[in-house]
Image (tube, rainbow, N blue to C red):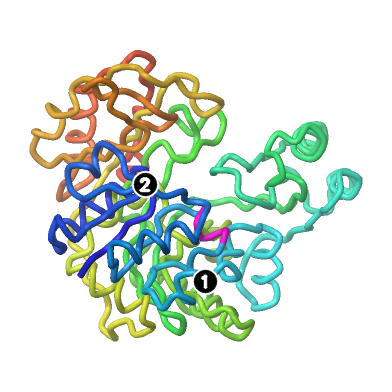
Amino acid sequence: MKVLVIGGGGREHALVSRLAAEVDPLDLWVTPGNPGTARLARTALAPLDRPDALVELADRERIELTIVGPELPLSVGVADVFARAGRLLVGPSQAAARLETSKAFAKAFMHRHGVPTARFRSCTSADQALATARSAELGYPLVLKADGLAAGKGVVIAGDRQEAEMAIHDAMIAKRFGASGASLVLEECLTGPEVSFFVICDGTRAVPIGTAQDHKRIFNDDRGPNTGGMGAFAPSPLVDAPLADLVMRRIVDPVLRGMAAEGCPYRGFLYVGLMLTATGPQVIEFNVRLGDPEAQVILSLIGEPLLPLLVGAARGNLPDAPVRLEPQVRVGVVIASRGYPESSESDQPITGVEAAEHLDGVSVFHAGTAHRAGQLVTAGGRVLTVVGHGRDYTTAIARAYAAVERISFDGMQYRRDIGKKAISA
């Protein structure tokens, strides 16, 4: 089968790496890819925000299954264009993708279908948002979320009214998040540990494919601004079989029924961001694709071929049996460039990646990298994800950081506490 992976980050490198064991290298394609995927698959170039160009690529290369990695192509309707062209694609329609592309839609959808989530108000003007913040009806701390896509950085937790007013000004008046912040969702701040719960869906049913815990803040001990993710570990020790069953019954199944009832059956990966509160799991957010860096730690724990699951999801006929998961753990450490998350530094020479990859129980996934004159260099904020494998978290953590120490570039930064939550849990 000829397979195309859309995207060029660490998540897509992880997908290509996993599929490389199941698909002939001549039949595995990626666009735009990165230096890591170039070693495993054939590379093509097509703009990710143009579904017509992507379907033209699939037609030209006779692609039989396309897998969408990032949210951008889904937000502009790539699944709809492929469906009209009669081509299989793993990913939701533009209407279904609103679970991620519009926080206001997602919150209203959850309210309509009884999915547990925080109390909220959707605000389409600064005056409305300021009035909500000043009323303190949702309490403090107050969570403010840009309605649209903001690369994982559109969330502010305001400790008091002054911080909330500043965040509203930044988003809606100063337009810090561009058009994504033209509307805001304000919601009560839930407390408890956060867990990422992943399923793959075929329109009517879903099967769990793993759990993880992400580290969003830039600095150790969850300090500093939010990022796209500075590391993750899998599986989450906080999710046992009864809790997983509860999440499926109270959250995932109602989402699938609700999407089908509203005329947009959900197919593809679904990432459920959970807060494990004292009253049970509640949804913080949905992503309509695999997370990054969570994909880098969960995909290799799927203990059966991935391709049949993807084909089943795209065709609407997932296998009835549960997905087998390996009894191992993964810890992934993101290495970022200087200035991230506010900015990034490019063209810094990177050394030591091959030395890191040669260590036992280690995988290295490229994200913000490029080749310049034969030299691997930085080309973005999050540069690499280094993953340690093991039977236990202590071993996986040690392997990940031993590999990180082999890698070097000017301005390199990373957290030194990834995975410690797993041990303390």
Write down the region rendered in magenta: 72-76
Q: Which mark is residue 45?
A: 2
In percent of the image, x 68 and y 38: which residue is there?
177
Q: Nearer the viewer, residue 237 or 37?
A: 37
Q: Which mark is residue 92?
A: none
Q: Residue furthest front?
A: 60
In percent of the image, x 38 and y 74: which residue is there?
87
Can you give x and y, in whole percent of width and height, for residue 80 in the image?
52, 71
Q: Is residue 135 left or right of residue 321?
A: right
Q: Which mark is residue 80?
A: 1
Q: Residue furthest top?
A: 410
Tell me the distance, in whole angstroms, between the alpha carbons under discs 1 and 2. 21 Å
Can you give x and y, in whole percent of width and height, for residue 34 in the image?
30, 39
Label pair 1/2, CB-CB below 8 angstroms = no
Q: Vertically, is 165 above or below 32?
A: above
Can you give x and y, in whole percent of width and height, for residue 302 in the image?
23, 63
Residue type for callout 2: Leu
Query: Secondary structure under badge 2?
Result: loop
Of labels 1 and 2, earlier in sequence is: 2
Crowd class of label 1 (few under 14; some 14 to 19; many from 20; radius 10 Å): some
Q: Vertically, is 142 above or below 354?
A: below
Is the N terminus in the top left, top right, bottom left or bottom right quadrant?
Answer: bottom left
Q: Of tags 1 and 2, which is closer to the observer?
A: 2
Q: Quadrant of residue 352?
A: top left
Q: Nearer the viewer, residue 37 or 259?
A: 37
Q: Is residue 255 left or right of residue 39?
A: right
Q: Nearer the viewer, residue 267 or 423?
A: 267
Q: Is 366 covered by the magenta stretch?
A: no
Q: How many marks?
A: 2
In percent of the image, x 41 and y 62: which residue is there?
56
Residue type for callout 1: Asp
Q: Is residue 101 left or right of residue 83?
A: right
